[in-house]
Image (cartoon, rainbow, N blue to C red):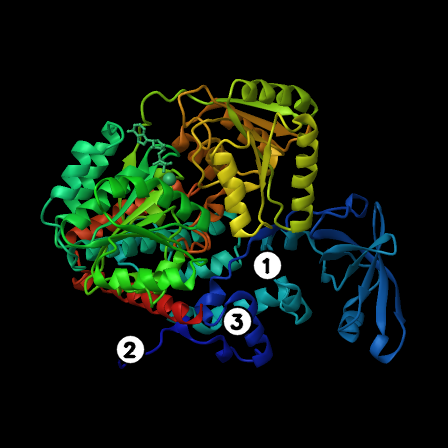
């Protein structure tokens, strides 16, 4: 492959910035992944300091990041000598005094300071020996005009400790960025056609970069943000739409031409219940896809308990009817087990051979399984990521189900696709309903099916918040439910920072419970992350078989277990859980015909957000509504599956707050592709070039990570 265009200004390595030491360049790469000038310019300030605000010495408190003061400087002293030398001075305004210190640049600072005139000081107060001081303040001779003309918004950049030690703190970064901008500014090329710039009323790209890093005023900042956010959102949408189109036209797949005996036989004679209308609709959507000679990429969204499993199973039967094999991949061993256990009887009823493969499968079982896969005797394989391994070879894989919404990276996808001469059809099942906006952004390249109906006969789960002081009442209620034959989950939060603490919490809770629910009348299972998989499985099974009435667990049970007889979910320290997690947990009950309960225990002091989460849980059981609130409270960055996949590489935009711009960008991208589907027109050349650049970047990324 050869490159015939010169490297664009933004792709220039930062090592080309005059005076940037190689050591610092390496540090920037290591700490912030900044390799090029473009990366550096996209190291956006995370906030701005309003330099129109003048503080007084008396107002200084510890939390203040930076302050601006007006006053005079007295008592300049130089202390220590040579290497340990420092200079101190006293800064005084009408309200009091604060100490200033310099460890470096003493001579320069000494010359600048003059007694008897007012200085405008800018710096960060810190506490030292019980009183405040400011190290290395910025000083200017004060004049009232200056205050009104000076740049009013000062950027603040995030920087790690190592960066700070190497003078790459906020000020260092600002200087470096200024230098880089001056170097390349005139060469920054527009990325979108002039027509779009006019239509969207965007400022030129190079101006936007200047203004975001050094805004003259709030308005300039606003224009700069809008331009750069548009840049992110528009190209993201363009990329997704193009990818979608490519998936739809050029990625060949195996057409499943017929619906045969296996599917029909199962559907007529072995379906354990009548499908809901939503399930029927989704099965039809899948059927229409797999009949075409194009690879299917479809996401099925359905709330917990909406019955996605049977839909996946019916889809797999379509593959089998056409001589193909199918597999189902789950994110955890427990979940894979659960799927296997629920699918096995269905498969056996129609003589379809099914097996399971996970990290803990034994060598001997593996060997048999590998042989049966290659010969084609094994038709459905359930498992974990172990399925991706190269040594797992299918005779003719045609259909893949991926449970839960974790998305694959390029490398994993390639592995999956390489399992047959044409890529298998892919069905992704997600139990976390995704708000429309996010689906549009993160899953814009997939088709989406929604199961928006629960199987009949489900009573809404009654949800109630209690403070911990009410625990005795809650446990009395638990007892009354157990005494009429029900089972109960009691869940403790996983404390990520401290596995020890986590375990202690759970075990304390367990002791307490055993005292409330003594043997031999009551039996309690306990499951946590420290157990060996086999012990975990054993404990789970005891609960599934109703040998125990209570299951005490950390969030390991979040996805998985299906025990229809369980009717109460008690969540301890519920304020520690995210909304979608609470909703997932609640979904563990309400699976049978009985009225079910979800009881949320919290401490007395709740943050505003925690209160909102708990209230939302009490108000609704609609997963989509919950997902909307969750997104609003947490922002998209935290949403499961989007962060690590890098689908949302948004540095500036927030798909909740910038929703309007997102939708505008989407429509615009749709229109552009409608007129010129492959971006071949001369007036779209900038778009095409920019996309190529982005793609190249993605590939480089692939190589690094
Ligand atoms: P999820 O969408 O959370 O994966 P499952 O597929 O595990 O849901 O289904 C939840 C429960 O509902 C299972 O016990 C399943 O057998 C049952 N179920 C699914 N569809 C129906 C239906 N149409 N009618 C009655 N029960 C159903
Ligand atoms: Mg499921």
Residue closest to the far left: 257
Q: Position of residue 114 (x, y in %)?
A: 81, 65
Task: Decide if ligand 2 comes within 8 Å of the CB at mark 1.
Answer: no
Callout 1: SS: loop
Q: Quadrant of ligand 2?
A: top left
5 on left or right of 143 = left
Q: Can you tell which of label 3 and label 2 is closer to the viewer?
A: 3
- Contact, mark 3 vs mark 2 (Cβ under 8 Å): no
> Would you place residue 538 above or below residue 182 in this image?
above
* Mark 1 or mark 2, earlier in chain: 2
Q: Quadrant of residue 482?
A: top right
- Do labels 1 and 2 touch, CB within 8 Å? no
Camera sees residue 8: yes
Q: Quarter holding the C terminus? A: bottom left
Residue at x-position 28% and y-position 77%: 5
* Spatial CA span between label 1 and label 2: 34 Å
Q: Which sits earlier in the primary sequence, circle 3 or circle 2?
A: 2
Q: Residue 364 sits in which quadrant?
A: bottom left
Residue 5, label in figure: 2
Category of crowding for the residue at label 3, using alpha-carbon neighbours closer than 10 angstroms: few (below 14), some (14–19), many (at least 20): some
Using a 10 Å C-alpha cutoff, classify the residue at mark 2 as few (fewer than 14 neighbours), some (14 to 19) or many (20 or more): few
Side (left or right) of 184 relative to 472 = left
Q: Is residue 434 visible?
A: no
Residue matched to label 3: 29
Horizontal side, residue 266 vs residue 465: left or right: left
Label 2 element class: loop
Using the image as rendered, state which of residue 425 and residue 301 is in the foreground: 425
Q: Which residue is mark 1?
A: 158
x, y percent for residue 32: 53, 65
The picture places residue 502, in percent across and down from the top left corner, at 65, 45
How far is disc 3 from disc 2 in space, using C-alphas?
25 Å
């Amino acid at each position: 492959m050869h490159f015939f265009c010169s490297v664009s200004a933004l792709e220039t390595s930062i090592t080309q910035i005059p005076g940037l030491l190689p050591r610092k360049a390496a540090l920037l790469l290591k700490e912030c992944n900044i390799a090029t000038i473009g990366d550096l310019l996209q190291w956006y300030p995370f906030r701005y300091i309003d330099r129109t605000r003048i503080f007084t010495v008396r107002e200084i408190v510890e939390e203040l990041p930076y302050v601006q003061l007006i006053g005079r400087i007295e008592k300049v002293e130089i202390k220590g000598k040579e290497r340990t030398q420092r200079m101190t001075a006293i800064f005084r305004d009408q309200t009091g005094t604060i100490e200033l210190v310099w460890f470096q640049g003493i001579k320069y600072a000494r010359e600048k300071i003059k007694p008897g005139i007012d200085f405008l000081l800018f710096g960060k107060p810190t506490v030292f020996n019980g009183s405040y001081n400011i190290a290395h303040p910025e000083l200017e001779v004060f004049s009232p005009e200056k205050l009104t003309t000076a740049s009013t918004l000062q950027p603040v950049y995030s920087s790690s400790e190592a960066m700070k030690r190497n003078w790459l703190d906020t000020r260092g970064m600002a200087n470096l960025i200024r230098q880089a901008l001056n170097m390349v500014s005139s060469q920054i090329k527009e990325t979108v056609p002039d027509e779009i710039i006019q239509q969207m009323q965007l400022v030129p790209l190079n101006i936007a970069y200047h203004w975001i890093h050094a805004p003259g005023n709030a308005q300039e900042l606003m224009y700069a943000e809008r331009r750069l956010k548009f840049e992110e959102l528009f190209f993201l949408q363009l990329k997704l739409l193009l990818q979608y189109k490519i998936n739809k036209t050029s990625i060949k797949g195996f057409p499943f031409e017929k619906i045969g005996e296996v599917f029909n036989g199962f559907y007529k004679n072995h379906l354990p219940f009548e499908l809901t209308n939503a399930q029927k609709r989704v099965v039809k959507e899948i059927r229409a896809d797999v009949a075409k000679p194009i690879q299917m990429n479809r996401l099925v969204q359905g709330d917990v308990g909406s019955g996605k499993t049977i839909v996946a199973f019916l889809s797999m039967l379509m593959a089998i009817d056409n001589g193909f094999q199918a597999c189902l991949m789950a994110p955890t061993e427990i979940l894979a087990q659960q799927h296997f256990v629920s699918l096995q009887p269905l498969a056996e009823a129609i003589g379809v051979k099914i097996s399971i493969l996970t990290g803990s499968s034994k060598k001997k079982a593996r060997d048999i399984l590998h042989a049966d896969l290659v010969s084609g005797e094994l038709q459905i394989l359930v498992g974990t990521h172990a399925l991706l391994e190269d040594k797992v070879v299918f005779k003719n894989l045609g259909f893949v189900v991926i449970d839960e919404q974790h998305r694959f990276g390029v490398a994993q996808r390639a592995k999956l696709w390489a399992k047959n001469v044409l890529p298998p059809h892919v069905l992704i099942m997600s139990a976390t309903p995704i708000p429309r906006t996010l689906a549009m952004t993160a899953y814009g390249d997939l088709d989406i099916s929604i199961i928006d109906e629960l199987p009949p006969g489900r009573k809404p789960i009654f949800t109630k918040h209690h403070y911990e002081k009410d625990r005795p009442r809650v446990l009395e209620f638990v007892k009354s439910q157990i005494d009429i034959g029900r089972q109960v989950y009691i869940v403790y939060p996983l404390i990520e920072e401290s596995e020890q603490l986590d375990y202690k919490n759970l075990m304390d809770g367990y002791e307490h419970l055993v005292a409330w629910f003594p043997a031999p009348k009551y039996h309690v299972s306990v499951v946590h992350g420290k157990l060996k998989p086999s012990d975990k499985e054993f404990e789970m099974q005891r609960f599934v078989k109703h040998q125990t009435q209570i299951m005490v667990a950390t969030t390991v049970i979040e996805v998985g277990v299906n025990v229809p007889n369980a009717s109460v979910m008690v969540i301890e320290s519920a304020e520690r859980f995210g909304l979608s997690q609470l909703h997932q947990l609640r979904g563990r009950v309400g699976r049978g015909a009985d009225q079910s309960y979800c009881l949320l225990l919290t401490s007395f002091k709740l943050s505003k957000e925690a209160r909102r989460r708990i209230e939302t849980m009490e108000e609704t059981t609609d997963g989509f509504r919950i997902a909307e609130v969750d997104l609003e409270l947490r922002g998209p960055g935290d949403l499961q599956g989007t962060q690590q996949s890098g689908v949302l590489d948004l540095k500036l935009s927030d798909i909740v707050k910038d929703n309007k711009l997102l939708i505008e960008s989407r429509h615009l991208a749709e229109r552009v592709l409608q007129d010129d589907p492959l971006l071949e027109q001369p007036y779209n050349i900038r778009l095409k070039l920019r996309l190529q650049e982005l793609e190249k970047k993605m590939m480089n990324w692939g190589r690094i990570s």
